[in-house]
Amino acid sequence: MKDIFQRIFFGPTVAGILFILIGFYLINNVSAEDGIPTTCVPNKGVKFDGVDSDKLVVLQNEVPLAVVYVSGYMPRPPYSFKFFGPELCDRGANSIMMIKGGFYRATFIKYFEPPTLGQETALVEPAQQ
């Protein structure tokens, strides 16, 4: 009987203690914010243009700068934007904005990559004489 008692209670007790210790370590030493950097775009000197029901394109001098993914479906255009910080970020308080009077959150910001100078886009230098 003592052997059955040990099998029933000893295994779950050890597993439970390990689960608690691992959870305690993760809570105190690992943070999602540590591994994921915050991405921001300026609010001044740029234009925001809705391109999909949940995406904005940020334009600077009519050149696409970044795509901003929004937390919900945006209302129909024309859009009016209001920001609450000096820049729009995908984390924290600066991720909150108003679009046509409703609150939305920027959930992800992806900058466009600069053009590469590959074969098809390489600048051709004139031959030296």
Image (tube, rainbow, N blue to C red):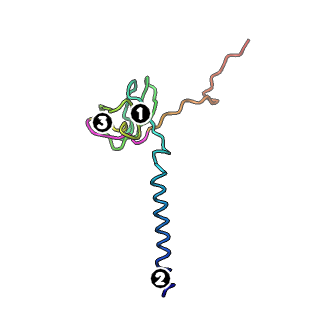
> Disc 3 versus disc 2: distance between alpha carbons?
61 Å
In the drawing, what numbered circle is on residue 45?
none
Q: Which residues are magenta?
A: 101-108
- Find residue 85 and report its horizontal and vertical position in percent: 35, 32
Amino acid type for the residue under numbered disc 3? Met
Identify the residue at image location x=45%, y=29%.
64
Check whether the beta carbons of the residues at disc 1 and disc 2 lie within 8 A of each other: no
Mark 2: amino acid:
Phe
Mark 1 or mark 3, which has the lower sequence index? Answer: 1
Disc 2 marks which residue? 5
As drawn, the residue found furthest toward the right would be 129
Q: Which mark sits nearer the N-terminus, 1 or 2?
A: 2
- Label 1 element class: strand
What residue sits 71% from the left and 16% below the top?
A: 127
Pointer 3: what residue?
98
Query: Up-down: is 16 above or below 100?
Result: below
- Residue 113 position in % (x across, y down): 53, 33
